[in-house]
Amino acid sequence: MSDKGKKGSEQKEIHIRNRKASFEYTLLDRYAAGMQLKGTEIKSIREGKAGINEAFCYIDKGELWVKGLHISPFSKGSFYNHEETRNRKLLLHKKELKKITGTLTEGMSIVPIELFINNRGWAKLEIALAKGKKQFDKRETIKRRELQRTLGRKVK
């Protein structure tokens, strides 16, 4: 067996989710974006020490950035450790970026949904083009979720 096969089987799955996003927003289009990270940042993500609940994305000078993404300092890092909530550049193809900027209108946001490490070992941030929900939409979501739970209980 090769070293790649062993490393992949030993490595645990990292999926850090923004659970509030689907409740607060109606998610329209989803994209997987790479991130420009420093060495200690990727090590902290592999340890699972990151949070995306307060993060949001914005476009500045034709580039997509994420702000508020919290990555804890690496435990074994020295003075090379990174700043916890610095702005990080997201990497997308130009075609995808143009599509996002073209469809982004008033009342829409770019929301981070999930931070994960793909099978090649790179950190990716799944983002979605989203539209904010009104209060009655949120109540409808809660009703639908409760209905699914009761149906699931009756089936069992």
Image (cartoon, rainbow, N blue to C red):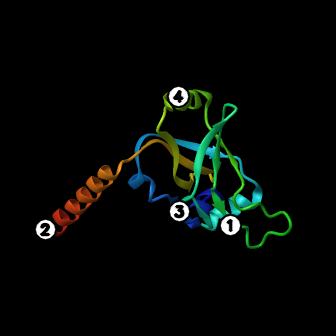
Residue shown at 73% from the left, 68% from the top: 74
Looking at this view, is 115 or 21 the one in front?
21
Q: Which of marks 4 and 3 is in front?
A: 4
Residue shown at 52% from the left, 28% from the top: 99
How far apart marks 4 and 2 lie (CA) works out to 44 Å
Counting from the top left corner in percent of width and height, residue 25 is at 41, 48
Residue lying furthest left: 154
Residue identifier under label 4: 99
Residue lying furthest front: 135
Q: Give the crowd class for mark 4: few <14, some 14-19, many >=20 residues within 10 Å.
A: few
Residue identifier under label 1: 72
User: Where is 112 relative to 78, above or below?
Assistant: above
142 to the left or right of 29: left
Mark seen at residue 13: 3
Residues tagged 1 and 4 counted as in contact (Cβ below 8 A)? no
Mark 1 or mark 3, earlier in chain: 3
- Type of residue at label 1? Ser
Looking at this view, is 32 or 63 the one in front?
63
